[in-house]
Amino acid sequence: MTDVVYPRRVTREVRIGSIVVGGSNPIAVQSMITENTRDVELCVAAAIKLHEAGCEIVRVTTPTLADAKCLGQMKQILRDRNIDIPLVADVHHQGTQIAQEVAKHVDKVRINPGLFVFQRIADSIDYTEDEMRLARQEVEDQLRPVIEACKVRDIAMRIGVNHGSLSDRMTVTYGDTPEGMVSSALEFIDICEKYDYHNLIISLKASRVPVMLESNRLMANRMSDLGMDYPLHLGVTEAGDGEYARIKSTTGIGTLLAEGIGDTIRVSLAEDPVNEIPVCYDILQALGLRRTKVEFIACPSCGRTKFDLTNVLAEVKQATGHLAGLDIAVMGCIVNGPGEMADADYGYVGRANGIISLYRGHECVTMSVPQESGVDELVDLIKQDGRWVDPA
């Protein structure tokens, strides 16, 4: 199969524990545990569960100084058990002390620019130039110790802007807009660069897909203009649950990835976080960015279909679904089947009178296999080619 290669935005590499984000590295998949951070053993178990499901970076909320120390205990327990899970501390309100402490233990610190210095400077809707200058200086004064703490251990920082928590200064200046989100991120990036700290990942998240799309596109363009190459973390925040949440997340994340924007992703569901992981990998697989399962190609069926395609597809998937990396087509007829499945490694195509044809790529290997033995014959063909592995 010839994959379509989407030109990917050129970004620097940023290490988060054993995972490297950006550059030519695979798009990393991450999530966040929901357990109370004070319950260290429960959090460790939740992080391991996510990791075993394929999550590559795990985030933990860190609202207080006591919680920050709990993350140190979590990291130590994981080390003692020889479990390599990159941990990220999620820091929000008045985060200087918390971020400084947690930077001693974790692989990345996430801060929210809109809440990092959480105070209103003026009672009026307008800010004077002096008030703006003083506010920015306060941000710099509180961010600098966090930068230094991250530099000591050479760990990363995520500047994570949320549409729903922009600072008053940004909403007064730019409104509740993507421009405000980008300006918020750039303010913090500028301070980091002032102190020669570049180990950064940027995110701009919103619960509305158009806002998320526009803010990330604008951020990518603005960084390009400024000569910045920081990786972007993508996600539609507060997407909800069920099918629609998955559609929202796929629409936002997948659209940007298809445009070459994005280096790590999270699908945020109001469900067990483990449910987020397969959605992430399905998005990446659909775009040809990571191959972690069999790519099944199947027609929607029509009056020309000569067998029960739904059941046959299920049988083929049951027999071959563990052969990650293969492309297998199950087509209902020979009118469109051979053409539509031309890029597949193997094809199972229905003919008349209970007969199917088997293909290896473009080559028709046999045209007269009885349907009742079709799946077995397909498996035998894969084995003949040396591409079969026994199920785990």
Image: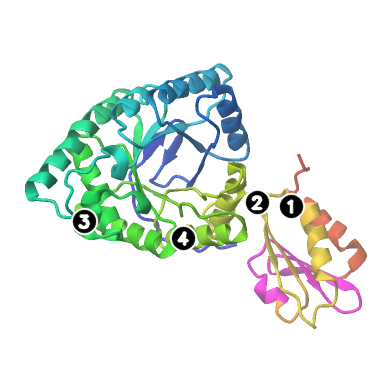
User: Do callouts 3 and 2 mark residues in contact (Cβ within 8 Å)?
Assistant: no
Which residue position is annotated with label 4? 252
User: Of label 4 and label 1, which has the lower sequence position?
Assistant: 4
Residue 266 placed where, x, y %? 49, 48
Which labelled disc corresponds to residue 321? 1
Q: What is the CA distance from the residue labelled 4 to the residue labelled 1?
A: 28 Å
Residue 126 placed where, x, y %? 15, 54
Q: Is residue 287 left or right of residue 174?
A: right
**Residue kind at label 1, given as amino acid type:** Gly
**Residue kind at label 3, given as amino acid type:** Val
Q: What is the CA distance from the residue labelled 2 to the residue labelled 1?
A: 7 Å
Q: Is residue 96 magenta?
A: no
User: Of label 4 and label 2, which has the lower sequence position?
Assistant: 4
**Residue kind at label 4, given as amino acid type:** Gly
Q: Which residues are magenta?
A: 337-364
Nearest-to-viewer mark from 4 and 3: 3
Between 104 and 232, which is closer to the camera in this rendering? Answer: 104
Which residue position is annotated with label 2? 293
Q: Residue at x 59, y 26 (%)?
A: 42
Category of crowding for the residue at label 4, using alpha-carbon neighbours closer than 10 angstroms: few (below 14), some (14–19), many (at least 20):
many
Q: What is the CA distance from the residue labelled 1 to the residue labelled 3?
A: 54 Å
